[in-house]
Image (cartoon, rainbow, N blue to C red):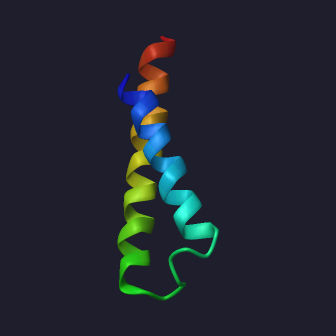
Amino acid sequence: MTCVSAAIAATSIATALFSGIIQPGAPGSEILSLALAGLTGITIAGASALDG
């Protein structure tokens, strides 16, 4: 379930970043970008653990 919740969170952050809700260059955008990278890694690791 960690994989699914991380994927949902990553999708929400990506939507906020790439839809224009968060302005490019805003201080929060760098933090959200790092969070997106971390959640993407957790999603991939979780999916790999489930796979095999």
Q: Nearer the viewer, residue 50 or 10?
A: 10
Q: Residue at x 41, y 39 (%)?
A: 6
Residue 45 vs 40, above or below: the answer is above
Q: How many marks?
A: 0
Left-right relation of 8 to 42: right
Decide: is 14 above or below 3: below
Q: Residue at x 35, y 71 (%)?
A: 31
Q: Left or right of 10: which side holds 27?
A: left
Residue extending furthest top?
Answer: 52
Question: What residue lies at 40% left-to-right and 34% top-to-bottom?
Answer: 5
Residue at 54% of width from left, 69% of height from top? Answer: 17
Residue 51: x and y in percent read: 51, 14
Q: Which residue is outermost to the bottom?
A: 25
Q: From this viewpoint, which residue is outermost toward the front?
A: 21
Front one among 9 and 50? 9
Q: Position of residue 36 (x, y in %)?
A: 45, 57
